Amino acid sequence: MLIDTHSHLNFNSFKDDSRKIIQKCLDNDIWMINIGVEYSTSKRALEISKNHKQGVYASVGLHPIHMASGLVKIKSDPGEAIYQEEFDYEKYKELALSEKVKAVGEIGLDYYWKPKTKGRLNLFKEKQKDLLFQQLKLAKNLNLPVIFHCRMAHKDLIDFLKNSIKPEKAVAHGFVGNAEELTEYLNFGYYIGCNGIIFKKIEGIDFEENIKRTPLERILLETDCPYLAPPNQGQRNTPLNLKYIAQRIADIKRISFEKVAETTFQNAKNLFSI
């Protein structure tokens, strides 16, 4: 068994064939958690999960790039519109109360798209932190784990967690950071999400060393589909490619594919109470 702990079959990229892909995944012993990034995709993730008794779950949250700040313009991904909204605690709470919702996320900080002037940048960062605080409060009140998104902001996120609400259970989704940042998340007791980005070359990031440093008992498998397809696996990623992530981790750690699959599946069950 494998479980894709971060998929987006609730996105427009899968509007025509999500049912077919999900069934193929289940037939191949691949479970999944579809992740919301704003209200509509969070609601869609929940609706999809309700069509399946087992193996398909949801997470709800407002991604920082979908925050209505009025301070920055964000270029949308092909086929995916960037809807920006104010966070409505009660609306998200209503979704999160479902037994099919296993986490709050993906939420966090993202400084990739940002204002150019110092004053607007500082305000932009404070707005993201306020949004994060509200959603961490939701997770705490509902006793749900958190799926953290963090891009170009690990220091700020780590400092924020040390001085604000720090959830007991969380995963650093698609971790792209250095050894020191990795250690901070591990010291928090968090899991580390590994997806297709581990096949890429990014200056200053040693994915192989990060995987070696992370105990297998703290790793979760992800695809982040439709993005980050492993090499030579097509442009649109799906949970069916999760096996390539598992095999890469097995190769780096010099253990069997079966050991990676078994342990990461149990890790997901432990974190998300599946």
Image: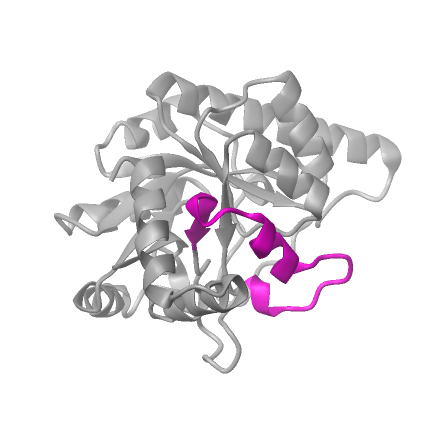
Which quadrant would the C terminus be assigned to in this image?
A: top left
204 in the magenta segment: yes
Most extreme residue toward the left is 53
| Rendered position, 185 above or below 227 | above
In depth, the one of 266 and 200 nearer the eye is 266
Residue bounds of the magenta highlight: 197-221
Res. 265 visible in picture? yes
Picture quadrant where residue 244 is located: bottom left
Most extreme residue toward the front is 254
| Rendered position, 254 above or below 102 | below
In depth, the one of 37 and 2 nearer the eye is 2
Taking the spot 43% from the left edge, 63% from the top edge, the residue there is 255
Taking the spot 65% from the left edge, 52% from the top edge, the residue there is 74
Which quadrant would the N terminus be assigned to in this image?
A: bottom left
Q: Position of residue 138 (x, y in %)?
A: 42, 22
Taking the spot 45% from the left edge, 79% from the top edge, the residue there is 233
Q: Position of residue 251 (x, y in %)?
A: 49, 69
Task: Please indicate whether residue 117 sits to the left or right of residue 147 in the image.
Answer: right
Picture quadrant where residue 141 is located: top left
Task: Please indicate whether residue 121 sits to the left or right of residue 220 in the image.
Answer: right
| Rendered position, 142 above or below 151 | above
Task: Please indicate whether residue 240 sits to the left or right of residue 168 in the image.
Answer: left
Task: Please indicate whether residue 67 sits to the left or right of residue 263 in the image.
Answer: right
Q: Position of residue 132 (x, y in %)?
A: 56, 28
